[in-house]
């Protein structure tokens, strides 16, 4: 059978691949501790579930508008004003089946063949692949742990060319946990002002999982707001991964373009999930804050455990729920059966010898590191890191 060459343009997400390998081992009876997937291990809060049940009873069971129900788009605007001090109208909002679809809509709406998209490393695995699907060129800018895994204004300036169409980044960042401060965004803004044709695509899906202070958005810089596209959703901050609700806030032209793209792929998002999302966005954020507090406790304990392992350098994440340690001290070592040559080898070694799933840093553009999630119970995390330490000690 001959399949489309479209499939050769992009790769399967390593995050999903590692999760699948973990599931396969678990199905064989192996006790695998999952540190690979980026999913809160909390249940959706009861008041949000109740809203969904009521929506079913109220017969919200028909096709939805492509851009989302008007009350949900208004709720997004309320959230953006309440939490971020940003003024948007419902016409600026497009609701999608998860933030991943939102990102795809934006990139397909903006990027033509040969256009360049600047992405600082490390970055979420799907960013580069979506650019390839759009036939754009990925321009990665290597950041360092010493620099907080943040792109500098000088690096940004050097990367921009006449072909640059989009700058794509996340804050808080998956996988590094990097959080850009308002002053750091202002410094980048000085560069963007010199290049008015560059659109800034800001992935803010981990907004609420922030351990260092207030969330800062590039869209809060008034003269750049029309050039910023915010991507956000309810998966991380509200423990609603399976509900598949994402959204963008953008200027009207980009919003209409994304609505047009989505109209041919999926049309409107699930009706029940949308009604639940209205309640999530307009209700008390106490459950979200309590979840973040628990992540903060796990973060501290995991950092203690990771930093107790010889040769591992692990910066403290300022947001999200991952640690992203440099594991390269173990490259070139062997337990007598397996030799570790790179991050992929190390992730597979830990899966089969420690029975802990992780994701190799190459997938995120940083080959010296491995990503470990702490979106798991503290007892599981403690056991998992003991296993990892034991398995690494066997390498010489």
Image (cartoon, helix red, strand yellow):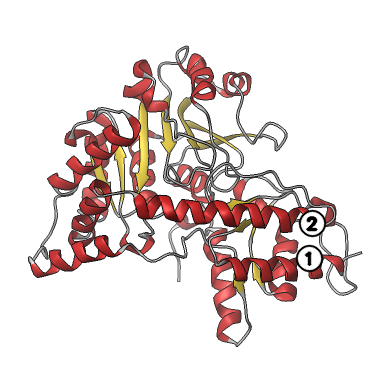
> Which mark is nearer the camera, 2 or 1?
2
For label 2, the crowd category at 10 Å Cα-Cα, with few meaning under 14, some 14 to 19 and many 20 or more, is few
Q: CA–CA distance between discs 2 and 1?
A: 8 Å
Residue 196 versus residue 44: which sits nearer the camera? 44
The answer to which quarter of the image holds residue 176 is top right
Q: Do the numbered discs 2 and 1 sit on residues whose CB atoms are within 8 Å?
A: yes
Q: In the rendered view, tell whether residue 50 sits above or below residue 216.
A: below
Instruction: Choose between 107 and 73: the one closer to the eye.
Output: 73
Question: Does residue 349 appear in this view?
Answer: no
Which type of secondary structure does the marked residue at label 2 adopt?
Answer: loop
Dot label at residue 389: 1
Q: Give the percent coordinates (x, y) of residue 64.
A: 14, 55
Q: Is residue 51 left or right of residue 363?
A: left
The residue at the point 44 percent across, 35 percent down is 215
* Residue at screen point 81% across, 70% down: 390
Displayed quadrant of residue 241: bottom left
Residue 388 shows in the view: yes
Q: Is residue 271 left or right of residue 119?
A: left
x and y, in percent, of residue 75 in the image: 21, 43
330 lies above or below 162: below
Rendered location of residue 94, percent (x, y): 24, 42
Q: In the rendered view, would you say 187 is above or below 303?
A: above
Q: Quadrant of the C terminus?
A: bottom right
Give the residue at x 55% y 51%: 296
How packed is label 1: few (under 14 Cα within 10 Å), some, or many (20 or more)? Answer: some
Q: Which residue is mark 2?
A: 308
């Amino acid at each position: 059978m001959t399949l489309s060459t479209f499939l050769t343009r992009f790769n399967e997400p390593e995050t999903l691949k590692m999760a699948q390998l973990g599931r396969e081992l678990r199905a064989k009876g192996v006790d695998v501790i999952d540190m690979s997937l980026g999913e809160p291990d909390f249940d959706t809060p009861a008041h949000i579930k109740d809203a969904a049940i009521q929506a079913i009873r109220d017969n919200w069971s028909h096709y939805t508008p492509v851009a989302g129900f008007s009350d949900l788009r208004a709720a997004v605007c309320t959230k953006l004003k309440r939490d971020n001090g940003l003024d948007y109208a419902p016409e600026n909002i497009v609701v999608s089946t998860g933030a991943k679809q939102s990102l795809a809509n934006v990139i397909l709406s903006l990027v033509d063949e040969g256009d360049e998209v600047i992405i600082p490393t490390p970055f979420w695995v799907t960013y580069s692949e979506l650019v390839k699907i759009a036939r754009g060129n990925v321009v990665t800018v290597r950041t360092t742990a010493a620099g907080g895994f943040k792109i500098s204004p000088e690096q940004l300036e050097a990367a921009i060319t006449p072909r640059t169409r989009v700058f794509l980044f996340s804050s808080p960042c998956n996988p590094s946990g990097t959080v850009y401060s308002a002053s750091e965004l202002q410094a980048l803004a000085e560069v963007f002002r010199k290049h008015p044709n560059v659109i800034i695509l800001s992935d803010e899906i981990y907004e609420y999982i922030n351990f260092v202070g207030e969330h800062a958005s590039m869209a809060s810089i008034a003269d750049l707001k029309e050039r910023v596209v915010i991507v956000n959703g309810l998966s991380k901050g509200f423990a609603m991964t399976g509900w598949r609700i994402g959204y963008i806030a953008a200027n009207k032209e980009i919003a209409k373009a994304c609505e047009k793209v989505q109209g041919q792929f999926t049309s409107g998002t699930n009706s029940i999930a949308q009604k639940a999302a209205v309640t999530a966005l307009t209700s008390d954020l106490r459950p979200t804050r309590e979840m973040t507090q628990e992540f903060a406790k796990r973060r501290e304990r995991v950092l203690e455990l990771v930093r107790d392992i010889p040769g591992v350098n692990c910066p403290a994440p300022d947001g999200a729920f991952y640690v992203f340690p440099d594991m390269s001290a173990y490259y070139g070592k062997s337990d007598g059966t397996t030799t570790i040559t790179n991050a992929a080898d190390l992730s597979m070694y830990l899966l089969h010898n420690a029975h802990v799933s992780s994701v190799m840093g190459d997938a995120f553009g940083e080959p010296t590191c491995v990503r470990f999630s702490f979106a798991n119970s503290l007892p599981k995390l403690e056991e998992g890191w003991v296993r990892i330490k034991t398995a690494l000690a066997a390498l010489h």
